Image: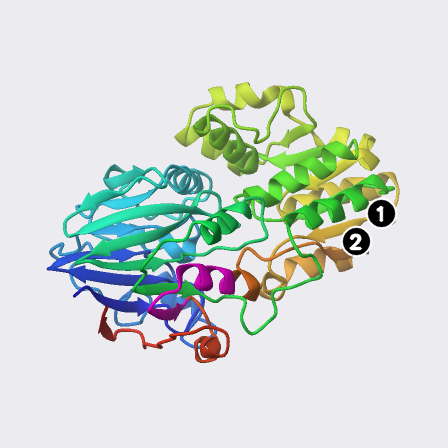
Amino acid sequence: MPKIIIHRGAHTIGGSCIEINSNGCRILLDAGMPLMEKGGGEIDKRKLENPSVENGILPDVKGLYKNQTPEVDAVFISHAHIDHYGLLNHIHPKIPVYLSEGSHALIKIGKVFYPDGSKIFFDNFRTFKHYKPFKLGSFKITSYLMDHSCYDASSFLIEAENKKVFYSGDFRGHGRKAKLLENMSKRPIKNVDCLLMEGTTLGGGHKVGFINEEEVEKGLYDIFSSQKDVSFFMASGSNIDRIVSLYKAARNSNKILVLDLYTYYVLDQLKKLLHGHRLPPHKNDNIRIYYISGHAQSIVDYLGKEILYKFKKRKIKIEEIVARRQEMVVKLPVSIMERISKELVKNRPLKDVKFIFSMWSGYLEKNAAFYEFCNKYQVELEKVHVSGHAYLDALKSLAQALNPKTLVPVHTLERDNFSEHFDNVKVYDDGVLFEI
């Protein structure tokens, strides 16, 4: 019988790491950096600076790490969020890492623009195609493309010894790929023995009044189309759904969208990966690029200065932003927003300016710079966001479609409440081995 150990994720959000063993073949589902202590407490930053098995940052997985003899056959990464791949720099370089093409691209781009001194062994990366099963040792594995705030996210069907395990990864049913969940409900996988399903949003705190990504786009359009001065926008550059919503809202309201080099390069590379997909940028569109020196230097160091020349026709300077301020929608780091604001107020005071926060509201509390910027320049903070994770109706939709013999909660702080909403729930602690 296949055996499963949740090394981390039984009672925490993020830091996911789950092992499945069949006939001595061992695979891991995700190898994430933890976001919190067990139960939701804040992590001591000193632990993150010196991760180890002893301090709990590295899960206790025999044969996974660089200082050990490799005994894990493969690591499968569901998507390119650090709480799912952030420990890859610690694993043994002989262990292959499997992930989607989009996840591969996002991780490599992130290491260029935000290098942390650690090394990920990209030579051991192996990309797969969604919906195309492949064999690895005792396992047959199929990736399913999922709707999530991170681009090209996977869930996994793992088959071994006539048993089926489905790992949801992170998903939702209200993004730009909402039909993926609908399709899975219409054509469900049969005879699932175990569903490992996330439950991030259970317990509340993830809704801010917008139902889906379409509503977010409309909310942004309403702001941009009536703005009397510049608008500032804050979101993750790797949240492609959100960047597309931002792009469409700015374009449809005849505004100029100012991006940093990182966000623009992500779009440019994903568009190439998809061979001309409808993703921006488009020829003669409304996107301009503000060159941050650190980003520009990273491109020169790792990618070559010819890329800066290639993007030069889109380059915008502060002087043009100031001169055309009412036309501007600015998505840049808050430190650069402050630099621009200093120049704007020399011309005239900021009036009726919005700072649009389009991320999980918990980040507002973790980073004081957002409120400090708004208070300093008397800018109104407005939340326009929808979660990257499934709400209860989508969680129920997946669970009902797959109808598993056993449903095991992961990536949640609310595992003890799963049985109120789902059938056949079994709860396991981190480190406890169980059979299918």
Residues at marks 1 and 2 touching, judged by CB atoms closer than 8 Å: yes
On residue 53, the disc is: none
Can you tell which quarter of the image residue 391 is in?
A: bottom right
From the viewer's perspective, is residue 308 above or below residue 372?
above
Q: Which residue is mark 1?
A: 350
- Measured as percent of width and height from the top left, residue 385 is found at 66, 55
Q: Which residue is mark 2?
A: 377
Tell me if 147 is positioned left or right of 324 in this view. left
* Mark 2, other Cα within 10 Å: few <14 / some 14–19 / many ≥20: some
Tell me if 297 is positioned left or right of 69 in this view. right
Q: Residue at x 27, y 42 (%)?
A: 133
Mark 2, secondary structure of its residue: helix
Residue 81 lies in the magenta-colored region:
no
Tell me if 183 is positioned left or right of 349 in this view. left
Q: Quadrant of the C terminus?
A: bottom left
Q: Quadrant of the N terminus?
A: bottom left
Q: Residue at x 67, y 41 (%)?
A: 246
- Measured as percent of width and height from the top left, residue 423 is found at 42, 74
Q: Tag 2: residue type? A: Tyr
Label tally: 2
- Measured as percent of width and height from the top left, residue 269 is found at 47, 30
Q: Tag 1: residue type? A: Leu
Residue segment shown in magenta: 395-410
The residue closer to the viewer here, 252 or 14, is 252
- Measured as percent of width and height from the top left, residue 82 is found at 42, 54
Residue 406 appears in view: yes
Residue 147 appears in view: no
